[in-house]
Amino acid sequence: MRKARTVIGIVVLALSVVYLVQVVDGPVLRETAEALAASPGPLALALLCYAAAFALRSWAWTRTLPGLEFSQSWAALHVSVLGNHVLPFRLGEILRVTSVLRRTSLAVGPVTATTVTLRLADLLSVAVLALVAVPGLAGELIGAWAWILAVALAAAAVPVLVWARRLLARGPGERVRLPAATIVGTAFVAWALEATLAWQVAHAAGVSLDYHEAIAVTAVAIAAQTVALTPGGIGSYEAAGTAALAALGVDAGTAFAIALATHAVKTAYSLVVGGVALVTPAPGYWGNLRLPRVTPPRPEPYPVAPDAPVVAVIPVYNEQDVVAEVVRRLPATVEGRPLVCIVVDDGSADASAARAADAGAVVVPHEVNRGLGAAVRTALREASALSPAAVVYLDADGEYAPEDLPTVAAPVLAGTADYVVGSRFAGNIEHMRPHRRLGNLVLTRWVRWTARRRDLTDGQSGYRAFSARAAAEAEIIHDYNYAQVLTLDLLGKGFGYAEVPIRYHFRTTGDSFVKLGRYLRKVVPAVHRELNADRLADRPPLPTARWRTRSMTPTR
């Protein structure tokens, strides 16, 4: 069905373009365009009036939907207009709702109810303006259907108003306001302001169109555009506008040039302003893509006992050939503090758990393989229960030197950082496959941009240290991996960040679980959820919004 609608839309668009090419009067259209370009001041003023019409509609929406900011109302309307100009079947109307839902914590019911209510008020005002601005014009063009359309719109408003009225009695998250006379009046004023554009284009074309006539032409053209199948109503808008102007005595060729030029200016406005509205104000239509420029102040550290241990945590999955060596090579003490090693066995099918235990590690088992992110989450929880001076994570595959642990832990133990990453690219890489080096560098640049940290040189390192508080408050929102989401989580909470150089050598045994395609499919959506989880925290729970898994914080 969707494919059939798309095909129909393409066919209708093609036919509309063919029609426009055949009927356009090139010299008249060129003269109109040159006249507009020769006097940009009046056109700019008309565009300001056009923008003011959207400002009024934005204000009206904020008055009927408590909690909706003007900036997001403005953005949603322009994203919708952009969508209507590039998508068939008026699909941009849906974007009014989705823009607000994706960019705020408002609930679906009130957003949808107020959107439909105000849109019906818009369309009803268009119908009324078409009937009264130039009496008899709408009847001359479409006969009795003009009144039938107006009555149908009024009837359609009744159940929507009943729906909105029911929302009045609900809780604060579902409350709306019914449109008052002032709100309804703004719809008429908005369309009158929008008509300034057609009025100015007509004057540029040498047609002395009265302002009330421009309102009637705009109303007729918009009424036709609302039921158009093509993007932007191309063809329908021009046909209706031309018919309305011709009925007012304008030459058909000139009338068509005015309608086409007016529509072209509106389309340019929608593409430019709608494109901006996709990304600003923050969050954009796709949500936050980066951490905020200003993060919270650095959290106060937990008090650390003089005998508090440094805890090394090592997630393991089928690494029986190397895990024991990694555990044995760890130092016994770090800056005079005892080292405790915790190995989280993530459902290994080999002897990894037994060999880690024989080497002196405390083994915490997962009954089944849950993923690296889940294993790190368990490891940080278990380490936090020991009230550590620092927690150091390292991979079990032998790629990272256990002897570098004191270097990675040093900034945490000194109190200069809460979260430390051992950077391979700032240290010594003995061997790394070229495609993995390239992938790491590209992903690191992405994480650096997302985190707004120029000092971030290794976004995927398997060697990291945490203060006691950072380990306790760290959140990993997916089971597959941890690296990017953990960095964004801790930096977003204001924890102090540092990097230290480390040594690295590519694994000589076993296989990495990282496969580029699957890695990107898992990690990129998780990063987006991490960047937007706090924004959606107050929204009524939906299956797709239950993202965060809280780690356990020890009692202190």
Image (tube, helix red, strand yellow):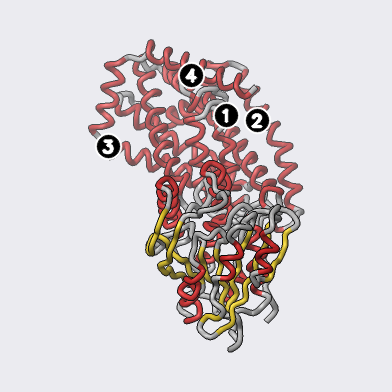
Q: Which residue is mark 1?
A: 127
Q: Is residue 501 visible?
A: yes
Label 2 and label 3: CA atoms lie apart by: 38 Å
- Mark nearer the N terminus (3 vs 4): 4
- At label 2, which amino acid type do we have? Leu
What numbered label is drawn on residue 40? 3
Quarter of the image where the N terminus is located: top right
Residue at 47% of width from left, 66% of height from top?
421
Residue appearing at x 66%, y 78% in the figure:
386
Say if 297 sits above or below 461 in the image.
below
In the rendered view, would you say 77 is above or below 535? Answer: above
Disc 1 and disc 2 in contact, CB within 8 angstroms: yes
Q: Nearer the viewer, residue 508 or 6?
A: 508
CA distance separating discs 2 and 4: 27 Å
Q: Nearer the viewer, mark 1 or mark 4?
A: 4
Going from N to C along the chain, the mark reached first, 2 or 4, is: 4
The amino acid marked with disc number 1 is: Ala
Which is in the foreground here, disc 3 or disc 1?
3
Q: Secondary structure at mark 3?
A: helix
Q: Residues within 10 Å of mark 3 (few under 14, many from 20)?
A: few
Residue under the point 67% across and 48% down: 544
Q: Are marks 2 and 4 in contact (CB under 8 Å)?
A: no
For mark 2, give the secondary structure.
helix
- Mark sitting earlier along the chain (1/4): 4
Residue designated by label 2: 153
Residue 262 or residue 432, whichever sits in front: 432
